[in-house]
Image (cartoon, rainbow, N blue to C red):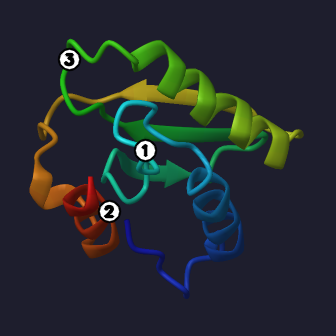
């Protein structure tokens, strides 16, 4: 997920990305950003952060844990905002969505 540094929300997006790097997939031990699970962060609505994200599979056994981790982490960082997570299945997640760091981490396992 790229940050447009000319966006008026660039600082918030960077802060959110730093926060999300601490949220790990409990099975893989890789953070949700490096896994490519976060599609978009929308700060344009007053007092609301909309997160578009996916999971590695619709049948992910750790879905509730991951979603709760994303919500809690962002709420701790942005306590003044309502966190709205939208689970997206199109496009489907695949390994190409991972960052090079995420792929390196996966190859170590």
Residue 78 visible here? no
Q: Position of residue 50 (x, y in %)?
A: 55, 39
Residue with the most extreme front position: 109
Q: Nearer the viewer, residue 13 or 28?
A: 28
Residue, x 70% and y 74% (percent of image)?
Answer: 11
Q: Secondary structure at mark 3?
A: loop
Quadrant for residue 18, please give it: bottom right
Residue with the most extreme right position: 80
* Residue where numbered disc 3 is placed: 58
Q: Nearer the viewer, residue 58 or 46?
A: 58
| Callout 1 touching callout 2 (CB < 8 Å) | yes
Category of crowding for the residue at label 2, using alpha-carbon neighbours closer than 10 angstroms: few (below 14), some (14–19), many (at least 20)? some
* Residue where numbered disc 1 is placed: 29
Relative to 99, 64 lies left or right: right
Q: CA distance from mark 1 to mark 3?
A: 19 Å
| Callout 1 touching callout 3 (CB < 8 Å) | no
* Residue where numbered disc 2 is placed: 105
Relative to 7, does residue 43 appear above or below in the rendering? above
Mark 3 or mark 2: whose residue is earlier in sequence: 3
Q: CA distance from mark 3 to mark 2?
A: 23 Å
């Amino acid at each position: 997920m790229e940050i447009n540094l000319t966006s008026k929300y660039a600082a918030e997006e960077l802060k959110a990305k730093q926060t999300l790097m601490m949220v790990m997939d409990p099975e893989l031990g890789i953070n949700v950003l490096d896994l490519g699970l976060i599609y978009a962060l929308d700060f344009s609505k007053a007092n609301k952060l909309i997160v578009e994200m996916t999971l590695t599979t619709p049948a992910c056994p750790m879905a509730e844990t991951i979603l709760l981790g994303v919500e809690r982490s962002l709420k701790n960082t942005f306590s003044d905002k309502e966190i709205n997570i939208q689970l997206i299945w199109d496009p489907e997640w695949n390994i190409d969505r991972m960052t090079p760091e995420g792929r390196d981490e996966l190859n170590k396992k």
